[in-house]
Amino acid sequence: MDVGLKVKKMEQNKLKDLLEQVTEQPSNECWSGIESRLDVLFPTDISQSAMNSGPTGASPSGSFLSKIAAAPLKAAAIIGSIAVVSVVTILTIQTFTKPENITTVIPKVSETTPVITPVDTLISIEVTDPVPSKKVENLISDKTNKQELNIVSAPINVAPQPNLPVTATPTPVLTEIRPTQTSTEKPVSNVQPVTNPDPIIQNQDIPITIPVKITIPNVFTPNGDGYNDTFVIEGIEDCSEHNLIIKNSNGKIIFQSSDYQNDWNGMDCPDGVYIYYFFYKVNAIEEKMLGRVIIKR
Amino acid sequence: MSISKIDKELLEGCLKNDRLSQRKLYEKYASKMLLVCMRYAKTKEDAEDILIEGFVKVFSALEKFKMESSLETWIHSIMVNASISYFRKNNKHYMVDSIDEGNMDIPNEYDLDGLDHLTGKDLLNILQQMPEHLKCVFNLVAFEGYDYEKIAEELDINIGTARSRMSKGKSWLQERIKTMHNNQ
């Protein structure tokens, strides 16, 4: 080897050796920065990421153990869902056999709707007879007169009866209906065919869930022109609890609020891409949304 | 080169987008790679920015890792590339190629004296203060062992410029080591 090269090599090694004495630990923000970027690039299942975001340092066998530990939980979840399905089936059959079937208008949910979360609301469904009929007073307090319906993912198509036009007020954005699993009473109406042959259905207040539509913009322009100047989360007022975190592209938290009033104007952050985390709670269900938002002035 | 069993397990987890494995992989190499980034950056914060970029790249390109080299070498090279893009981004407007810079012929084959009196920390501090354009070339030659041709291509400069920057960087470093030595 050329002497010059040899010297160079030695020098290189010397430099390297010297630097190797240095130990520098990256700050904790580093990983959270990477994680937030990964969350956007490769989103994982929320529950899974929550499980995995805990402290690490366990040996690789740790993950194996956690899988074993998780197995009974999974099994329980499967049994639980089977139970729900069977309850639903039974209740559905009962609904079908009743004289007063319920039809609901099902408007199409816009495809752009990012997230729909159910929230409990009371709507009243009036079922009227073509024959002039008397309406019976609402019986909200009486639990037996209540049919609890919940929007869930299993669709039940309740066929309309031609002689029983149904109006639902207010028109709910319904996707599907099924009786709640928690309701202990059978969802049988107080209007029994035997006692009341007249097919008049009372005004009933039926708690159903109306989906909350949360829309988070991907860009806003805080330039003071009066248009789109703040980061507005549509539907935030329907959330019982919420927490908004905005990080910059390096994962540093630049804005955080648990009582966000749609008033963040980007402060003095430069134009660019930011990552938002929006944790919210509707109907006791916690949800999380995350994504990118661009500030462009 | 074969890849260790632990690395393999981690890799499989990372490929499945398992955050725990990703974090373990990160924790295994983070401090080593931070050191690489710190050589190129001015401050530790800048180095961490590069580190984040680098690791995001690592996780998104993990499928392309063919296990031909060791995982560490592969991650290292990604960190170097991230550092180069960091340099490019921050020196867009640096007026580079003045003609005389390219043609300057400085004898560059002299030893660095006084290295023995330095601690690693000192060396790192000095390196971080080196002017950006010299630092990048110096790092690539002295630590990564790139040849000038490759550097010229990567940084979009002339080979002559790369050479002269290397020697300038070296004399700059030498100067700094000397003053530091004299001050002590």
Image (spheres, coloured by chain):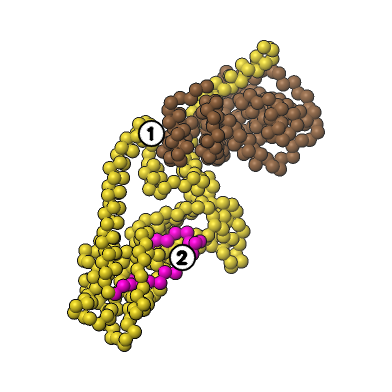
Chain colours: A yellow, B brown
Relative to A30, B184 lies left or right? right
Q: Which residue is mark 1?
A: A57
Give me the residue at 47% from left, 47% from top.
Answer: A43
Q: Position of residue A295 (x, y in %)?
A: 58, 56
Relative to A10, A138 lies left or right? left
Comparing B182 with B91, the one in front is B91
Q: Are marks 1 and 2 in contact (CB under 8 Å)?
A: no
Chain ID, mark 2? A
Instruction: Kindly state the secondary structure of the residue where label 2 is placed.
Output: loop
Q: Which residues are magenta?
A: A100-123
Give me the residue at 27% from left, 49% from top.
Answer: A79
Residue A236 seen by the camera: no
Whole-number angstrom distance, CA of label 1 to CA of label 2 = 45 Å
Instruction: Kindly state the secondary structure of the residue where label 1 is placed.
Output: loop
Q: Position of residue A105 (x, y in %)?
A: 40, 72
Quarter of the image where one finds residue A100: bottom left
Measured along the vertical axis of the image, is residue A263 above or below residue B54? Answer: below
Q: Quadrant of the C terminus of chain B?
A: top right
Chain ID, mark 1? A
Measured along the vertical axis of the image, is residue A37 above or below residue A94? Answer: above
Measured along the vertical axis of the image, is residue A80 above or below residue A69? Answer: below
Q: Amino acid under label 1?
A: Gly
- Looking at the image, tell me whether mark 1 or mark 2 is earlier in sequence order: 1
Give me the residue at 44% from left, 63% from top.
Answer: A213
- Determine if the magenta segment contains residue A112: yes
Give me the residue at 63% from left, 28% from top.
Answer: B139
